Image: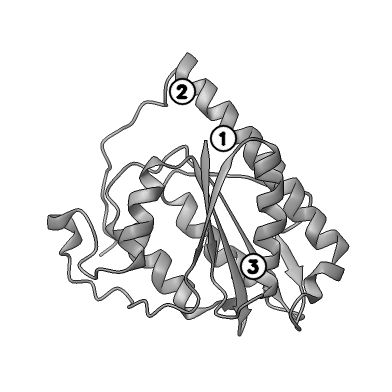
Amino acid sequence: MKILLVNGSPRANSNTLLGLHEMEKIFREQGIETEIFSIGNKDIHGCIACGRCGELGHCVFKDSVNDFAEKLQAADGMVVGSPVYYGAPNATVQAFLQRLFYSSHFDMSMKVAASFVCARRAGTTAAFDVLNKYFTISGMVIAGSQYWNNIHGGAPGEAAQDAEGMQTLRVLARNMSFLMKAIALGKEKIGLPEKEAHAWTNFI
């Protein structure tokens, strides 16, 4: 089994990366392969609504979004970690996710997903809500923990002092590991839920 970890911070040795490493240790203990994608310092274009992904099956911009999508198709889950900028995930993370979820035409349902955010002080729950919307619209299974998934720290390494935050991420990683294994077993024994054709309705 494999899980992909998205690091949305542009800073080397960031608190966001520290949180991902904390989760990575648990995934490895659970026998789950991990791969970290650091996107925070990448030049990632926002979606321009060109619609070409409908023809191509991938985004027209050739960057880390398409690279990640190819790996996500074969993976069992994903985690997105983002710093909080003005009460929201940073712009690079949002551009990455908007293009990833809009341009990827494979079925993401029943892949296990989670996010966490890191802030010096406030804005965590608002940023956390934004990230989870990408998962729910795609039929992914969102894992929970013992608290909202946030850690606190300003200076590099400071989040290590947030004992409850680090514990929340470890619990999250264990819960995700269980869900990925349980879903794999469920697919084998009973199959996936039946799908209906999407009933598109515009409110105009």
Q: Quadrant of the C terminus?
A: bottom left
Q: Secondary structure at mark 1?
A: helix
| 155 vs 23: above or below | below
Query: Observer-nearest residue: 22 or 153?
Result: 22
**Residue 180, labelled with which disc?**
1
Q: Is residue 83 left or right of residue 185?
A: right
User: As displayed, is residue 38 above or below residue 120?
Assistant: above
The percent position of residue 138, horizontal first and vertical second, equals: 41, 48
Which amino acid type is shown beneath numbered disc 3? Answer: Leu
Hey, what amino acid is under mark 1? Met
Instruction: Answer whether residue 145 is visible to the viewer in this image.
Output: no
| For discs 3 and 1, the disc positioned in front in the rendered view | 3
Residue 17 — which label? 3
Of marks 1 and 2, which one's residue comes earlier in the chain?
A: 1
Along the viewing direction, whichever of 52 and 67 lies nearer the viewer: 67
- Residue 187's label in the rendered image is 2
81 lies above or below 158? above
